[in-house]
């Protein structure tokens, strides 16, 4: 059997989505399934595609070059999104045309992958499983990143086409399940709940890199934010909390990542002694970093009306870190946090409650340990990568247990 994963990001990109897909690909290989990855490689110059490379666990990866789409203007980014599906399809036809994918795993966003997936499905008579993580374009409209009505309608049309081209759709929350099922023309039976997943094994190995010494964090309670720094995260609210607690000498906020809002935050708070900024690190070293911290931070824009359960939650709970979360109203993450007992959660904008939760975790190590262990046990039960793999495969083949 051949499985093709179509995505815009993959390892060594440090994005949490890239790590998710690497773990899923490795899990498929444990079933002796041939795995191919069709991914984006940003470029400003040549559009010539490289030959497929062989990654860990014999996963074959074809990286297709495209126009740069991050940290560029809206017109340039829009152009890259429009061109992406054509470059991906052309790259596949040129380098992997002899590979007939039985199953195509499409990871969205971006929804423009629909054109690539639909053409490959029609040519090879493949089945498509859509892993849907952000309900775009609604999420972009919520945070003010997409204001033009005609562009919104254009992406809504592509969104509907993507849903219809998919044989099955896996969403990350109960609310998303209902929302997608209510789309006109979508069979409710093909939409299912598929939580994010993670491979626990890298978080159980011996720590090799001493980040505490390297970043001068010894004897500190380290609050880690790791991920994208953009409009969806509204980290400006996190920094309201940081300003309230800037005189706490035993606490430090470690911000690891970059994004559209990153430079402004760095410039504004570069002189704060309780903040340490770092760029993305090698994903292979990320488990070492997380396990040396004390509290995991999750932040979401208060204006979001759609579900968003960040992938970083998996890494925090794998590392037995309690989570301090500030999220949009109505997010299913609030219920998941309560059920798991893995941290404290409040609504973005409610600074008093956010600060109270922060101080509870900082002043009570026993509470941190208890919540960290509760989150770990919940993740073991619900978020193991092999469970996600089998939930996908059961639609296409008979899945054996304990493999």
Image (cartoon, rainbow, N blue to C red):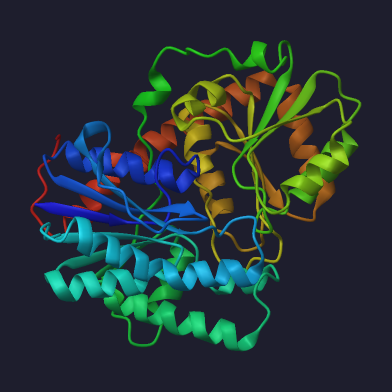
Q: Position of residue 210 (x, y in %)?
A: 57, 12
Q: Is residue 172 above or below residue 287?
A: below
Residue at x 32%, y 81% (from the top left corner): 186
Residue at x 67%, y 65% (from the top left corner): 73
Q: Position of residue 171 (x, y in %)?
A: 39, 62
Q: Is residue 93 above or below residue 224?
A: below
Q: Position of residue 11 (x, y in %)?
A: 40, 40
Marks counted in the figure total: 0
Residue 169 in sight from this viewpoint: no
Judge left or right: residue 118 versus residue 200. left
Asked where in the image residue 157 lies, by quadrant, the reply is bottom left
Residue 155 in sight from this viewpoint: yes
Q: Quadrant of the C terminus?
A: top left
Q: Is residue 59 above or below residue 302?
A: above
Tell which of 383 and 137 is nearer to you. 137
Residue at x 80%, y 38% (from the top left corner): 356
Q: Position of residue 164 (x, y in %)?
A: 30, 79
Asked where in the image residue 58 lies, by quadrant, the reply is top left
Residue at x 63%, y 25% (from the top left corner): 368
Tell which of 64 and 154 is nearer to you. 64
Judge left or right: residue 392 versus residue 84. left
Tell which of 206 and 271 is nearer to you. 271
Judge left or right: residue 238 versus residue 162. right
Asked where in the image residue 241 lies, by quadrant, the reply is top right
């Amino acid at each position: 059997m051949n499985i093709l994963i179509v995505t815009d990001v993959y390892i060594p990109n440090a994005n949490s989505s890239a790590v998710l897909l690497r773990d899923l690909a490795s899990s498929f290989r444990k079933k002796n399934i041939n795995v191919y990855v069709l991914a984006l490689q940003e470029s400003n110059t040549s559009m010539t595609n490289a030959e497929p490379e062989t990654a860990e666990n014999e996963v074959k990866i074809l990286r297709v070059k495209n126009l740069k789409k991050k940290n560029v203007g809206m017109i340039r980014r829009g152009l890259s999104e429009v061109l992406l599906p054509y470059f991906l399809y052309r790259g596949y036809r040129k380098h992997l045309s002899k590979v007939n994918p039985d199953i195509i795993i499409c990871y969205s966003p971006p929804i423009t992958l629909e054109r690539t997936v639909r053409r490959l499905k029609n040519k090879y008579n493949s089945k498509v499983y859509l892993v849907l993580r952000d309900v775009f374009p609604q999420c972009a409209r919520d945070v003010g990143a997409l204001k033009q009505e005609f562009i919104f309608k254009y992406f809504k049309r592509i969104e509907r086409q993507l849903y219809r081209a998919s044989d099955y759709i896996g969403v990350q929350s109960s609310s998303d399940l209902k929302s997608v099922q209510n789309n006109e023309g979508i069979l409710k039976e093909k939409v299912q709940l598929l939580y994010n997943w993670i491979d626990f094994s890298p978080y159980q190995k011996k720590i090799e890199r001493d980040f505490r010494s390297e970043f001068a964090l010894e004897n500190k309670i380290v609050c880690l934010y790791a991920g994208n720094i953009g409009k969806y995260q509204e980290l400006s609210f996190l920094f309201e909390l940081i300003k309230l607690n800037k005189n706490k000498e035993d606490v430090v906020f470690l911000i690891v990542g970059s994004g559209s809002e990153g430079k402004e935050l760095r410039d504004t708070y570069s002189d704060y002694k309780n903040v340490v900024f770092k760029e993305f690190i090698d994903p292979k070293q990320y488990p070492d970093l997380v396990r040396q911290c004390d509290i995991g931070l999750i932040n979401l824009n208060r204006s979001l009306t759609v579900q968003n359960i960040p992938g970083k939650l998996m890494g925090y709970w794998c590392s037995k870190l309690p989570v301090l979360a500030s999220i949009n109203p109505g997010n299913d993450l609030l219920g998941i946090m309560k059920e798991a007992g893995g941290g404290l959660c409040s609504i973005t904008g409610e600074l008093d409650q956010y600060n109270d939760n922060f101080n509870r975790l900082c002043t009570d190590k026993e509470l941190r340990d208890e919540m960290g262990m509760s989150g770990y046990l919940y993740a073991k039960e619900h978020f193991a990568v092999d469970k996600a793999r089998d939930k996908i495969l059961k639609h296409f083949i008979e899945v054996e247990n304990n493999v």
